[in-house]
Amino acid sequence: MSEAPVKQHEYDLDTSWMQKMGEWGVRAEPGKRGLTLAELQIGSYGEVPEITRNMTGRPRGAGERPEAYRVGAYGVRAKSEIWLSNATFLYEEALQRQWSSATDVPWHTVEPLPDAVEEAECLLCTFFNEVEFVAGDVPARWVAQTSPDFLEPRHVLLAQVMDESRHMDVFRKRALVNGGGLMRMSGATSGFVGSIDLARDFTEMSTRLHISGEGAVLTMFRMGELFGQNDAEKTMYRLCAQDEARHVAFGVMHLRYLAETAPDRREEIEFYLDEAEAQIMSGVQNPAGTQAETSEALAILLGGGKEHYDEGHKQLLVIRRRQLKEYMQRVKTAGFGARFENGRSTIPKQYEAAL
Amino acid sequence: MARFPSLDWFREVRDVYNSDSTLHKGGGGACHTTAAFRVDGKEYLIQFEGTKIGDIRGATAAEIKEVDFVIEMPFDLWKDMVKNVQEHGKAERRYTLNSIDLSQAEGIAHSPSDDQYRQDLFYRYNQNFQDYFDASARVETTF
Amino acid sequence: MAKPPRGGMAVPAAVSEGAAAAQSVEGVPEPTYEWMGLSAEWGVRVRPGEHGLRISDLNVGIYGEVPELWDDQTRRPRGALPRPGVPPLAYNLRAKHQMWADSAANLYEEAIQRRWIPATEVPWETLKPLPEDVERAMCQVCTELMQYANTEIEIITYWQDQMSYGYYEVKQFLATATFDCARMIEALRKRALGNGGGLGVEGRGLVNRMILESRGGWTESAVYLYLVRGTFTMHVLRGLLNAAHNDAERMIFAKAIEDQARHLTYGYDHIRYAIAHNAAEADIVQTLLMLGEVMMGAELEETTMKPALAIVFGGGIAGGRTVGMETYLHLVGDFVRNYLAVCEWLGVPRAEMLHPLLKKYLEY
């Protein structure tokens, strides 16, 4: 006698959602750089709204559900407020170029240094540790406030938060690896009026953080290879500089996009640049600036000791010139170069005076 | 043995760089840029695609205008840099591209289109370019 | 080495145009070296271990002292000397039990070591056409998981800049967590758009809302994010890995499981620490879970994850009605069992009080 087949239990299966999905039949193909976010800009999935109505947190292009909860506290809902044309590129680059402070920095090359040099390096590391706190906290805050319809710039900002976290840790490691320690905090990262923390607009924040602040720090990191005393420091500063250059690129390209698409905001941006420029050399946020105690530490490092302070100071002036020049170049690239020609900005005078 | 500067030399270094991933240091990674080296009046175009270097060839004036950035320094400085790499296995601190750029008043990298975003690629991809020149330690070189 | 800090801090004066130009001509004034000798502990020399120099290796002397309360609302690095007169910032979470996990430092380093790159490391060429119902189901699942990851990003980034730097290890780990989530969204979006499909319909967001509206403290958010939602997500990812159709999916879900495992380790570790160090916390967590189980149970009733996963596991709609749904229900049963076991381990047993909407899955 054959056995009757066991009938499996049949459950109800709702398939009505299949009719409510996003655009169907798309096929993103890997390009020569793999399957990047750029390759996903197809059909409706590549259409970024000028103003988003997405308050539910759905992925851009997903089917909408009328009863979905509007949970997004998204203050940033206009594309011009956050967009940049090469966000996909910067994000993918960030993923490709991650590094580990634990294993990619040759810590074994750090050897005892003269006390003054070690103190100077530790002061600088304490400062950079502190300053990266800002660069980590503030972009994170803006991510939570930005609609996921702007997935690409959000992703770049999340990569920045990751980079800054790594910077925080590498400077702490350097301060503690060579018989030194952390020094006194600078206080440069507190919320003075007009500072990065207090910005209530993303572009205002980005102008201060990415273009002014990180632009100045980028030059410092690059200088690290000159004042670094060993391979570990050279590596540490060079890798940080690469990351920082990406963050600066975000700022420049976002500002460029805004200048092109929201000309009514130009004058507002000019004011942000005015405020940022007032602090570039005189503010304590620039470690090479005139009021920063870190500038003394830099002069010691660049000169190779207290006894060569003057020589180090000369090199510091070179750094300031470079900071000013590159700042102007970046602002020009972003589409706001007229301010250096029409007398609005004092930076050209400062630069000429520094030559 | 290859003579610096020459296409053969740049291509031999490329082949060394591409063939050995241990030469690609942490913090390098994929890099997408077209740059040029201007050495002793001649221009050499170099294309990075991902973790490999593709084309290296002589560049026309029109092509130079389109590159992201050009690295240019006095010939003696180029020579000193390459000699330093040959002698030490990799560039010493003062002979890295970054250090040399900082030590020159106007730098050594500039964007032909005066676009700082593109010039900043020299900073963003600095590790790859440094790894490339450090790879020249394995290329027997004459001058 | 430490000297008493001097009073007040130098506030940069508003600099006039002329003064700015003049200062940059004169350069740095005669050095004062006031900053020299100002260190709370000098002479520290940490050494790299076999895994390199990790942040946990830095916990020597005062630098390793992690106080139960960090009352500094500035960005002072732990161990650095304070500077008087620095105004406070909105670092509202200043107690260790509000965010700490002993594992955070090592999880941070592990996250960096185990990074992956979807664009170039996932073998996208192995994606091959699937039957339409299965492809739709996969895309729907990807879309839901993307929303889970988005919620995680939004709640972490909401809290991150309120967490004080006394517990920087946690902030650093959470930076890796949001980066992981960004990568997850990226990989899932690529999967959904890479095989002739598209995105699914958005989830209603019951649990997303519960997570995002948890404003009482990071621990509350962590309970919903990791213990409730996160535990479920892990089971879904494991089920998807088991049912993967190709090497691309296998890699995506295998890597997602690794990333998620780190998040859960932190989450469970933190909740355990909070319960152990804050007398009121166990009762609070019990209340949170009572509410959380209702929401989770309600979501499980209506979520499109259910039919979509059933179709994936069953190889199509027909199989979804039988073996697929059985597999899904068993998955949810495993989630509930796992959830109960973790609650027991944390010291907030739920077995006796488990909400019926979740309890019913124990029969599977």
Image (spheres, coloured by chain):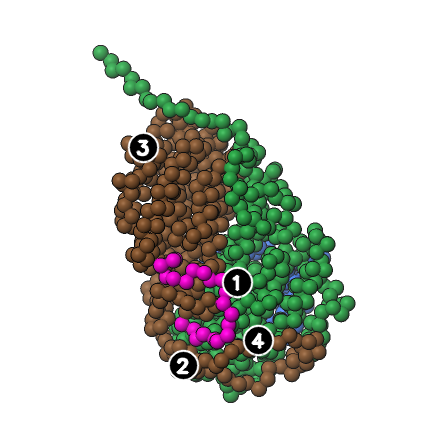
Find out whether residue C87 is within the magenta segment.
Answer: yes
Residue C335: quarter of image: top left
- Which residue in the structure is indicated by mark 1? A135
Label pair 2/4, CB-CB below 8 angstroms: no
The chain identifier of the residue carrying mark 2 reads C
Q: Earlier in the sequence, mark 3 or mark 4?
A: 4
Magenta stretch in the rendered image: C79-99
Q: Earlier in the sequence, mark 3 or mark 2?
A: 2
Type of secondary structure dominating the magenta stretch:
loop
- In space, the residues marked 2 and 4 are separated at their CA atoms by 23 Å
The chain identifier of the residue carrying mark 3 reads C
Q: Which residue is outermost to the right?
A: A342
- In space, the residues marked 1 and 2 are separated at their CA atoms by 29 Å
Residue in the image at 43% along x and 56% along y: C174
On residue C11, the disc is: 4
- Which residue in the structure is indicated by mark 2? C2
